[in-house]
Image (cartoon, coloured by chain):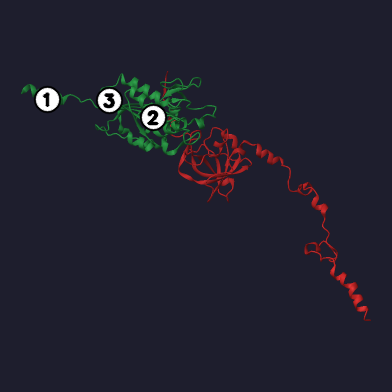
């Protein structure tokens, strides 16, 4: 018996001293047996990142390509003062009609929008289309407009209409949008009047 | 003594020739940055309304009574902006041209200033107007001094004379036989008639477009069946 105790100690001590390390907390979830040594997976680490990143780097979609190739893509993303209240504005071109397009408040619909003319001021914010080769290059582009309405109006000579004037302080490009199917105000006071009905006295050449 | 008295009486009974003013108004040119993309582009040359007024002044001076004076009113802001755009001092050029014709410009900046300049009472300081001629942009209802200069394809409200503004021009500022002509486009289609009704003097205007491109006094555009009317 006196020999058995040292013999047992001699056999058990190395087992206790050279016990395998406990598994890490992170690897415990994947391993069913916590006593099993966590074997690193060198294959997974050595894999090229192509397989993993395939989901993240998506190929450009057609719409993105189309947007990037539009001339309006050259308009600055933001310009001038772009803090404070703003209007949603959409460039609309009506042939032979003075004005820039429609503006509305954020919570309004395009039916409630106002047709505006833009006044170009020498020290003010340039009108967005002035960054582009032609004025019609930003047709149907949408912007956030920072600025205010002028206390005076502009005269539209084709329709004899008064149009609101917007003083631009800054803008933010929002990209292309669907055309607004709505005519600008027209022919308000150009109807025949009692003076015109009298007719002119023609001078014979 | 008798001779002196008779000479004095004779001088008092003689009608004194009244001095009158002849008003020439030059509107402003459009900006090329607005107009260059249009099919019917306006104002390729900046001085259409200056040259025509200067030439007209030269013509009038040959028949002008010695008491009468030509007053040349020029809309200033448009020449300033066109000059900035083309990096030219157009004021210097137009003043030189006026000087050669014996006239100097009086600048106005908006329609209110124009109305003030046209307000006359027949005194020595403010003689009545015996003739008024306008050179500039217009349509059938409006004189547009700053057409396509601050707003693309339009004009600002304080810088146009609409037919609804004509009641601010008094017929008493004109002589009873005053002659008025508008050399702007389409004035004869309505503006002239409203002028005659409100101001009380006939105004000759164009039915159709007028053309300044040949220089000198504008003429009716050809091929549109245009005519002059009052």
Helix, strand or loop for disc 3: loop
**First in sequence: mark 2 or mark 1?**
1
Tell me, for residue B55, which label it has, or none.
none
Residue nearest the observer in this picture, A90 or B167 = A90
Choose between A103 and A176: the one closer to the eye.
A176
Are the residues tagged 1 and 3 within 8 Å (C-beta)? no
Looking at the image, tell me whether mark 3 or mark 2 is earlier in sequence order: 3
Q: Are marks 3 and 2 on the same chain?
A: yes
Q: Which mark is residue B68?
A: 3
Which mark, by number, is residue B91?
Answer: 2
Q: Nearer the viewer, mark 2 or mark 1?
A: 2
Q: Nearer the viewer, residue A73 or B1?
A: A73
Relative to residue B207, is residue B129 drawn left or right?
left
Looking at the rendered image, the quarter that the C terminus of chain A falls into is: top left
Residue B113, given in percent of the width and then of the height, sits at 35, 37
* Chain assigned red: A
Other residues around mark 2 within 10 Å, as few (<14) / some (14–19) / many (≥20): some
Label drawn at residue B8: 1
- Callout 1: SS: helix
Q: Residues within 10 Å of mark 3 (few under 14, many from 20)?
A: some
Q: Chain of mark 3?
A: B
| Image location (x, y in percent) of residue A110 | 59, 45
The x and y percentages for residue B19 are 25, 27
Q: According to the colouring, which chain is green?
A: B
Mark found first going from the N terminus, 1 or 3: 1
Cα separation, mark 2 vs mark 1, equals: 49 Å
């Amino acid at each position: 018996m006196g020999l058995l105790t040292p013999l047992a100690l001699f056999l058990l001590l190395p087992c206790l001293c050279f016990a395998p390390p406990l598994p890490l907390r992170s690897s415990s979830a994947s391993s069913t047996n916590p006593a099993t040594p966590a074997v690193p997976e060198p294959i997974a680490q050595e894999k090229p990142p192509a397989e993993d990143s395939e989901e993240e780097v998506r190929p450009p979609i057609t719409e993105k390509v189309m947007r990037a190739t539009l001339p309006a893509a050259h308009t600055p993303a933001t310009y001038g003062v772009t803090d404070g209240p703003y209007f949603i504005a959409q460039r609309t071109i009506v042939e032979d009609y003075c004005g820039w397009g429609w503006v509305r408040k954020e919570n309004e619909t395009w039916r409630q929008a106002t047709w505006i003319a833009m006044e170009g001021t020498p020290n003010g914010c340039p009108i967005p289309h002035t960054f582009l080769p032609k004025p019609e290059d930003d047709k149907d582009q949408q912007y956030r407009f920072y600025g205010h309405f002028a206390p005076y109006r502009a005269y539209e000579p084709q329709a004899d209409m008064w149009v609101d004037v917007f003083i631009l302080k800054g803008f933010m490009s929002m990209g292309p949008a669907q055309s607004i199917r709505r005519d600008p105000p027209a022919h308000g006071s150009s109807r025949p009047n009692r003076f015109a009905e009298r007719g002119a006295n023609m001078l014979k050449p | 003594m008798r001779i002196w008295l008779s000479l004095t009486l004779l001088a008092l009974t003689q009608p004194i020739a009244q001095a009158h003013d002849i008003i020439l108004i030059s509107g402003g040119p459009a900006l090329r940055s607005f107009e260059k993309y249009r099919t019917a582009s306006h104002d390729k040359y900046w001085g259409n309304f200056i040259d025509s007024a200067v030439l007209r002044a030269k013509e009038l001076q040959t028949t002008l009574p010695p008491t009468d004076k030509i007053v040349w009113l020029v809309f200033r802001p448009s020449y300033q902006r066109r000059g900035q755009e083309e990096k030219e001092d157009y004021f210097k050029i137009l003043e030189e041209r006026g000087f050669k014709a014996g006239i100097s410009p009086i600048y106005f900046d908006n329609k209110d200033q124009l109305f003030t300049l046209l307000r006359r009472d027949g005194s020595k300081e403010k003689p009545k107007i015996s003739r008024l001629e306008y050179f500039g942009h217009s349509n059938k209802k409006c004189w547009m001094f700053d057409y396509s200069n601050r707003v693309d394809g339009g004009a600002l409200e304080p810088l146009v004379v609409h037919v609804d503004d004509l009641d601010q021009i008094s017929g008493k500022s004109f002589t009873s036989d005053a002659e008025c002509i508008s050399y702007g486009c389409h004035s004869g289609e309505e503006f002239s008639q409203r002028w005659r009704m409100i101001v009380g003097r006939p105004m000759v205007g164009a039915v159709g477009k007028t053309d300044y491109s040949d220089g000198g006094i504008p003429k009716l555009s050809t091929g549109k069946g245009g005519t002059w009317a009052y």
